[in-house]
Amino acid sequence: MDAATASQAHEPPRAPSTSELLLELTHAFPNERVTVGELLDRLEGRAVGLILLILALPMCIPNIPGISAVFGALLLAPSLQLTLGARRLWLPHFMRSWTFPREGLRAAVNGAAPLLRRVERLFKPRLTFATQFPFTILLGLQALLMAIVLIIPIPGGNWPPGMTISLMALALLERDGLLALMSILATIASTVTAYYFFRFGVYAMHEFGDWIGALFN
């Protein structure tokens, strides 16, 4: 065995990338519907960033109306965990028993994986202070705000907060502080977008109500 081969033999195994972890997760559940408890148990011991990413990815694509409120409620727990620096994610039993279709998770992951693979080469550990406590308090508060925005019924308002939380999650997973700092701008942009989407929705409903009223007058 030459020196190069010996060196390779003693190298630690390469840590799986985020996209590889996600694709592995899509084959982890045998049933057609997956409970939130099963998902959290499978992710137990992994970074809170991965939990945030799993819950945020379905919000980055068109979805059934109203489902964003469910995922927004689920995102409250890991967001609070990140804010408070808790080590273990806890959910009440009724939330652990919520289910979602396995194919929905698979579609979200399969849709995001190609893009993740392309951009993962851009992520690297840098400015790591921005991914550690106490800076994670700010990230947690941002994720909490985005989760609340998801709960509010805003037409078309699910994808900006979903993408923002995904950005934060990737920053935590890759220990990329630059990405974490960029998430601050993304949070501001998502909040402004949600505000104008909400105003437009209220205006559209008001106009529709006036139109219906005019039909019966």
Image: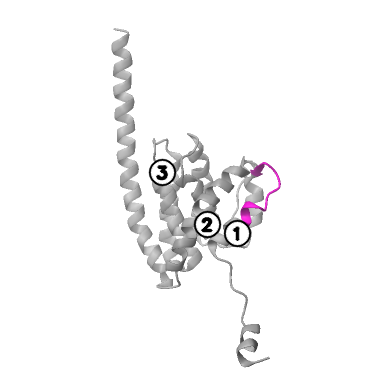
Residue located beneath label 3 in the image: 149
Is any part of residue 108 visible from this angle? Answer: yes
What is the CA distance from the residue labelled 1 to the residue labelled 3? 25 Å
Picture residue at 38% right of the left edge, 58% below the top: 183
Q: Position of residue 43 (x, y in %)?
A: 62, 57
N-term-proximal mark, 1 vs 3: 1
Q: Residue at x 62, y 79 (%)?
A: 12
| Residue hosting label 2 | 81
Is the residue marked by circle 3 packed among few (<14), some (14-19), or many (20+) residues within 10 Å? many
Q: Residue at x 64, y 87 (%)?
A: 5
The residue carrying mark 1 is 88
Q: Quadrant of residue 19?
A: bottom right
Residue type beneath disc 3 = Val
Residue 32 in magenta stretch: yes
Q: Is residue 74 above or below residue 119?
A: above
Please tell me the numbered disc located at residue 62: none
Residue drawn at x 64%, y 92% is 2
Circle 2 crowding by C-alpha within 10 Å: few under 14, some 14–19, many from 20: some
Above or below for 11 versus 129? below
Q: Are marks 2 and 1 in contact (CB under 8 Å)?
A: yes
Q: Is residue 94 above or below residue 134?
A: above
Q: Which residues are magenta?
A: 24-34
The residue at the far front in this view is 2
Question: Going by the image, does 103 lie left or right of 167?
Answer: right
- Callout 2, which amino acid? Gln
Secondary structure at badge 3 equals: helix
Disc 2 from disc 3: Cα separation: 18 Å
Q: Nearer the viewer, mark 2 or mark 3?
A: 3
Q: Residues within 10 Å of mark 1 (few under 14, many from 20)?
A: few
User: Which quarter of the picture shows residue 33?
Assistant: top right
CA distance for labels 2 and 1: 8 Å
Please, what is the three-letter code of the amino acid marked with disc 1?
A: Arg
